[in-house]
Amino acid sequence: MGDVCVLGLGLIGGSVLRAVSAAGWTAWAATASDDDAAAASAAGFTVLPIDDALRRASDTGAVVVVAVSLDAINSVLDEVGRLAPACVVTDVGGIKQPIAEHVAASPTSLRYVGGHPMAGKAESGWPAGSATLFDRAAWAVCVEPDTDRSAWAEVANLALATGAEVVPVTARRHDDAVARISHLPHLLAAVLASAGAQGGPLGLSLAAGSFTDGTRVAGSDPNLVRAMTEGNRSSLLPALDGALGTLGAARGSLASTGSLAATINAGHAARDALQRLGSAPRVDVRIDLSASDSVDALLGLGERGGRITAIADGVATGYVPDDDA
Amino acid sequence: MGDVCVLGLGLIGGSVLRAVSAAGWTAWAATASDDDAAAASAAGFTVLPIDDALRRASDTGAVVVVAVSLDAINSVLDEVGRLAPACVVTDVGGIKQPIAEHVAASPTSLRYVGGHPMAGKAESGWPAGSATLFDRAAWAVCVEPDTDRSAWAEVANLALATGAEVVPVTARRHDDAVARISHLPHLLAAVLASAGAQGGPLGLSLAAGSFTDGTRVAGSDPNLVRAMTEGNRSSLLPALDGALGTLGAARGSLASTGSLAATINAGHAARDALQRLGSAPRVDVRIDLSASDSVDALLGLGERGGRITAIADGVATGYVPDDDA
């Protein structure tokens, strides 16, 4: 346990504050939203002006969690660099490489380790949060060859304290992965919603599970969706090209031979792989964070679909799914 | 209330048998599956050999519900034509125009009215069914200028008895609509699942709600998905071309200007339209089925997203959503 300073009290920041407090950590927050501040205060949490929150973090050596919207992360990180430069700081933004580049180019040095909890819902703001939002969820914690491993362990510990499991990953690999499993789904949901609406009220009246599920995330705040998809352009373009290629091939096959076997069988096998990964037997893994090859070991675990579930005495323990089982 | 003969005891047929029995109708069934027959018999339902089931239907004037897989519907309809030609018969297949064409070309005349309950799940077979599967679900019941309106009313009544609401629609309009709200979602789910799996175990480990929701129906039986999508080629191709166009435009805009505003805003507006349709105030509608313009009135109600909720004394009552509210 330790001290945490949470900046931003929307869905994610508000849930971090609740979860780490419930886990016994000493936590306080700052937010630019008067509504969120009032609601969190009324619920018994400590909400301070941002300067006071960061000075307290600096005094106590707290981990600072930047949980503001994507377009505000860089400027808030700069603020942390001015008022609490010795603190370990992380963020929860949905894209990691551009933020890592901003930090690397920053004149002040920051003990920054990027993070991204893979939990969300269509609702936003303090009222949408909960102490259990991150239970068993994946929380990407970025690690690179030059990452300060004690700072990494502090951020990973914070993520574990919320109930999440930690996925070690480089910023670049994270951005490539979320292009496929988060940003592309948002785009396809938007395309599907538009295609359905073009069928008029009759079509929407007949719509059932496949359409409702497939368009659910099209209901998310368009500004948040634009920020994450447009901000991840370099990773999203190849994923989008792949999807266009697969869909175009399906179109060609349907028009020429009448068959959709390749598309549908591949999709079914892929969905099976997702289900299998979740239910596969697990092989325990132990990584000594002081070892010279620990970064490679962490990244290897992440690539294999593994997760870190605890860190104690400089040793990370977790599991990888057993592919061969 | 009346008599119902259900042919096929999978998810849909098994749920129809349970639902109409619970509603007090006299119902019996036949199935080619020994497992489903044994399970339904054990649950106290009457399961007969198909010839006996159809002879009983012929004797009692029962409505016959053909609830077999898409590729077997035509041959079972032919069987109904041989053994119970005077009975009103419907089916629950996911495509309507090809079946209507088969019936029209049939040497024996059949009192056929096509149907399609918009309820389903990834699981199939008798054990997956339930008496409440159709509660408030849309059940498309096909109507054309030359439809026998008393046969239509019998089938609509059967659908209403299961707890569903009836959407009157022509076979052609039905097939166009389901291409957009059922078949395209299945294709996009398959494409998304494949794109995600190409990210490897790391990507699947990071996958959360947007990917899980967007790929759920990719877990459906590939043979069932192929049958409905490939069988609806003429309606699916234009819907697929539309989706390819929208997705390609998004790709072009992201690559050139960096903006996905048009795609994401249109998707959000379309999803809003779906939500609004479900919660809109309702205007009551009353259609005298003996009136000369009743087919037009039924089809107009369906086009506006309306549904029939009761039929009594030759009068159908229901509602349309109030667009202007």
Image (cartoon, coloured by chain):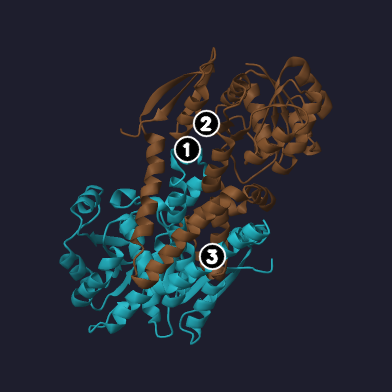
Chain colours: A brown, B cyan
Mark linked to residue A196:
3
Q: Earlier in the sequence, mark 3 or mark 2?
A: 2
Closest to the observer, B313 or B120: B120
Say whether mark 2 and mark 3 are on the same chain.
Answer: yes
Q: Check the picture and name the quadrant holding the N terminus of chain B.
A: bottom left
| Residue at 45% in and 67% down | B178
Q: Is residue B284 above or below residue A46?
A: below
Q: Residue A200: x, y in percent?
A: 56, 70
The answer to the question of whether label 1 and label 3 lie on touching residues, with beta carbons closer than 8 A, is no
State which mark lies toward you, 3 or 2: 2
Q: Amino acid at mark 1?
A: Leu
Q: Check the picture and name the quadrant holding the C terminus of chain B.
A: bottom right
Closest to the observer, A161 or A207: A161
| Residue at 81% in and 25% down | A83
Residue B82 is at least partly visible in this image: yes
Mark linked to residue B202:
1
Q: Amino acid at mark 3?
A: Gly
Q: CA distance from mark 3 to mark 2?
A: 36 Å
Q: Residues within 10 Å of mark 2 (few under 14, many from 20)?
A: many
Going by the image, does A236 lie left or right of B19? right
| Residue at 71% in and 33% down | A103
Tag 2 residue: A167
